Image (tube, helix red, strand yellow):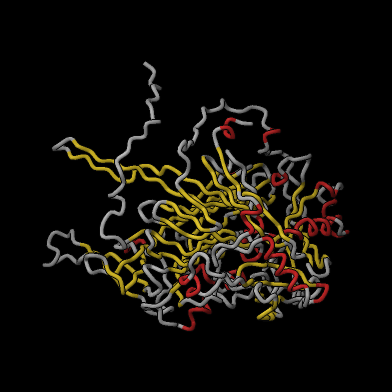
Amino acid sequence: MSLADETTCCHATTKAEAASVTHPLQALTPAEITRVAAIVNADPPYGVDTRFETIELLEPEKSVVRAFKPGIPIARQARVSVFSTTAIGVTRLFVSLDSGAIISRKEFPQARPMIQLEQFLAIEGHVRANPEFIAGCARRGITDMSTVCVDPWSAGNFSIPGEEGRHLCHTFAWQRLRENENFYAHPIEGLNAVIDLKTWEIIRVDDYGAIPVPTKEANYEKEFTKTTRKPMKPIDVVQPEGVNFKIEGSALSWDKWSFVIGFNARESLTLHDVKYDGRPILHRASLVEMVVPYGSPVNGHFRKNVFDIGEYGIGKLANSLKLGCDCLGVIEYLDVHLNTMNGDVMTIEKAICIHEEDSGLLWKHWDFRTDRAEIRRARKLVVSTICTVGNYEYALYWYFHIDGAIEFEMKATGIINTAGCVPGQPGKYAREVLPGVVGQIHQHIFCARLDTAIDGDQNSFVECNTYAEPEGPDNPYGNAFYESETVLDTELKAARRADAASQRYWKVVNPNKTNYTGAPVSYKLEAMNCVTPFIGPNSPSGKRSSFIQNHVWVTAFNPDERFPGGDYMNHSDGAGGLADFIKQDRPIKNTDIVLWHVFGLHHPVRIEDFPVQPCISTGFKLVPHGFFDGNPCIDLPAEVNEASCCANAVIT
């Protein structure tokens, strides 16, 4: 046992603990998933060819959640997407667990399901066995096909002849020179197989011309590290009196916070019924899409515009976290239960990590006249999960601060997607990270869906801009500037972009509830990481990701409007997402609204990003803005941490 393990402790939920349903927003239990699959398989839409994309909770209406009291019977329904192994189309079913019946059925004849985890290695196997692909590898000096690693990329929608009406996967390949070494150091450039996921036919192998496969190794696993730096002394996080949070089923409470934790195969972590001191702030919050557009038009790289949530589902790709490594401190883990393609239960142990962290200085003031100081330290509750999508790791962190702020942070690590080049000639769209190996410029653009409930469901959306007063009689010294607020009262008006020149920000207000000044209570969106997209909005990939053209969107609440790019993203044409939602131009003033925030990472690759990328992060905050009548943490007791001590590190 390592020192980290000795000084870190945890608790993981047992199967028995996970079996009982204690809240209407609790995710489906293993028994419920099994029962839903049995109900569907009793009348499968595609007969023996029926497979399951997702089985998840069909969330009840808000009125049901608001009326719920412990002990009240909980009606349970599931939302199910199934597909055929042989034909195009997806069928969406609503299933009642109480009646044991399918209560709603809707067909989407042109939709394609997400690429499933169970298909990854099958795709690799079929590509490796294809004679045309084998010949392409031979032209690059590769004869042992067992050394070839094939990553399954979504195909997009590029109107390429021969691809119409199919469910395709476009692939990129690398070579692993020996066991466990980093194959991303050896891209097989310019050789891309396109495979039909219904027939398992390789419909085409695109060979853009052979260049030598780079052979220099760049490894990260500890078995390859010959020398290491001197170990640092440990930093131990201990809580001798235990943690300050409690979990009952999926309902968590900590300090003045309470909320319900959910999880599904597509979005991964979801948060529900979020309240501070009993006052509602969010009905639901989650990351609903991420798109990663790459900037290179060279060879087959123009197709790299992957929607990791909508085309793969990051929940199913969640890691089983390791104590003392992924999570440090006194940890509570939650297992998650999803479905396989066959409808069996897939359990990811320790997929969700919950812990507390010291968060530095919260507030302080020293009165120089009296030489008196008051200091309070901050802490936060962290709810996190880490998902691996091929080469990249995405670590999702939701932070709940004691001052009423909610923060989301996305940390991106893992291995950059690599391509090959003639050594020393990376081209204008990439940077060489190893001789003959490049990382292409790209972006990671995320969309969060925030179903706001600021002191209730009747909310409005306000834009705030700062302007300088024109110099003149009202501004004789040229120092005057002020903030102007505008209520954006329809969906089309509320599709907005950031503007640094006016220090623009947005807030969600409840016009029916006021603070002591008479102003509506509100929460401010701190949009610190807005990015400018560089793909053409009318390009094939731009049409499918039109939601990235604005940094905020606001829609009237509709439970069926769940995803910014549409419900089924594989081979999508751009229809059925935010751009279509707001064409209705519904009123969004003093009503139930949903705030969608688009943010991200602009990533010109660094040499330091290889062989494994140090974490880079992005995110946003929701902070109280007139929600309270003053600093909500003025009541914190004065404390001195007795475990802190002097380091005595100064050498004299």
Q: Is residue 306 visible?
A: no
Question: Image quadrant for the N terminus?
Answer: top right
Q: Return the x and y of residue 238 as percentages of the image width and height.
A: 48, 36
Q: Residue at x 75, y 40 (%)?
A: 180
Quarter of the image for residue 525 reads bottom left
- The residue nearer to you, when weighing 477 against 240, is 240
Question: Image quadrant for the C terminus?
Answer: top left
| Image side of residue 63 versus residue 39, left or right | left
Q: Is residue 523 above or below residue 64?
A: above
Q: Is residue 83 above or below residue 642?
A: below
| Image side of residue 91 versus residue 410, left or right | right
- The residue nearer to you, when weighing 353 against 648, is 353
Q: Residue at x 73, y 40 (%)?
A: 181
Q: Return the x and y of residue 581 as percentages of the image width and height.
A: 51, 79
Quarter of the image for residue 96 reads bottom right
Q: Residue at x 52, y 62 (%)?
A: 286
Q: Is residue 615 above or below residue 39?
A: above
- The residue nearer to you, when weighing 32 against 440, is 32
* Furthest residue in direction front, as rendered: 71
Q: Return the x and y of residue 282 as percentages of the image width and height.
A: 44, 65
| Image side of residue 203 versus residue 275, left or right | right
Q: Is residue 313 visible?
A: yes
